[in-house]
Image (tube, grey):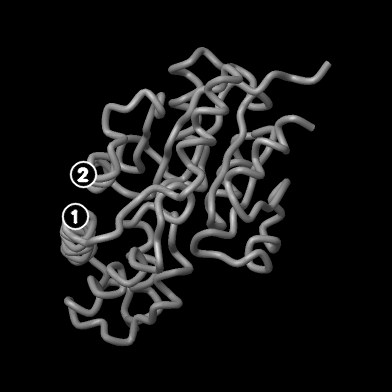
Amino acid sequence: MKKAIKLAVFDIAGTTIKDNSNVAGSFQYAFIQHGFEKVTLEEANEKMGYPKPLAIRDILSNHVTDNGAITSNLIDAIHDDFVQNMIDYYRTTPGIAAMDDAEAVFEALQDMGIKIGLDTGFSRDITDVILERVGWKNATLIDITVCSDEVERGRPFPDMIQVMMNKFGITDPKEVIKIGDTEVDVNEGHNTGCLMSIGVTTGAFSEEELLKHHPTHIVHSLTEILGLIDQ
């Protein structure tokens, strides 16, 4: 008997919120502010979706000869600048908006009895600014949000999805689907044991890049998810 899907977990930037590499650009700029001018946009983009302090450590390791120079104070300082860059960006930049089909898909899934969760590599302070900006802060469209600084381990570990499952009394990960635009989204779904771990091409990674991480499906718009569930 086919399991009923009870929870759909979506990423935020690049998946449900429009992003034209602005997150990666702000991440890169935080390194430049601290004298790491050789950090490239490509490096920053490769770390999209990861908890940002972990991503900062990984990138710094490519740019210093002595790993002892990668102190917690340096990581915190770069992260603080990144957070402020992102808060300023999401508060003030014109055109911050949901993906065109996101809200309709959320509604359609909720009509099927499926809870809507958002998880993210962002910390709660950035996430709340985004949700406020697009009108999702207290919206019935979203049943739960979990951020990387609210769990012991961020993506690609299953902790954020497990928090949501516990909230809704879901014990079987085959009743959960995960949707996101990055490597860590796909691997988070796999590591949780989700029924589907769906890669979407609207954000940081192309179809070719996503395929390397073996998503169960690849879609080019969120609307296509509805067809997958009906199969």
Asked if one can make out residue 24 in the rendered structure from this viewpoint, the answer is yes
- Between the residue at mark 2 and the residue at mark 1, the CA separation in whole angstroms equals 8 Å
Please determine whether, in this image, residue 40 is positioned above or below residue 134: below
Read off the residue under disc 1.
87
* Residue lying at 44% horizontally and 55% vertically, measured from the top left: 49
> Are the residues tagged 2 and 1 within 8 Å (C-beta)?
yes
Q: How many circles with numbers are drawn on the protein?
A: 2
* Residue lying at 45% horizontally and 37% vertically, measured from the top left: 103
Image position of 92 (left or right of 165): left
Could you tell me residue 177's position as x and y percent? 61, 34
Could you tell me residue 54's position as x and y percent? 37, 57
Q: Is residue 36 or residue 45 the one in the foreground?
A: 45
Earlier in the chain: of badge 2 and badge 1, it is 1
Read off the residue under disc 2.
125
Q: What kind of residue is marked 2?
A: Asp
- Estimate how packed mark 2 is, as few (under 14), some (14 to 19) or many (20 or more) residues with alpha carbons within 10 Å: some
What secondary structure is marked by label 2? Answer: helix
Asked if one can make out residue 73 in the rendered structure from this viewpoint, the answer is no
Q: Quadrant of the C terminus?
A: top right
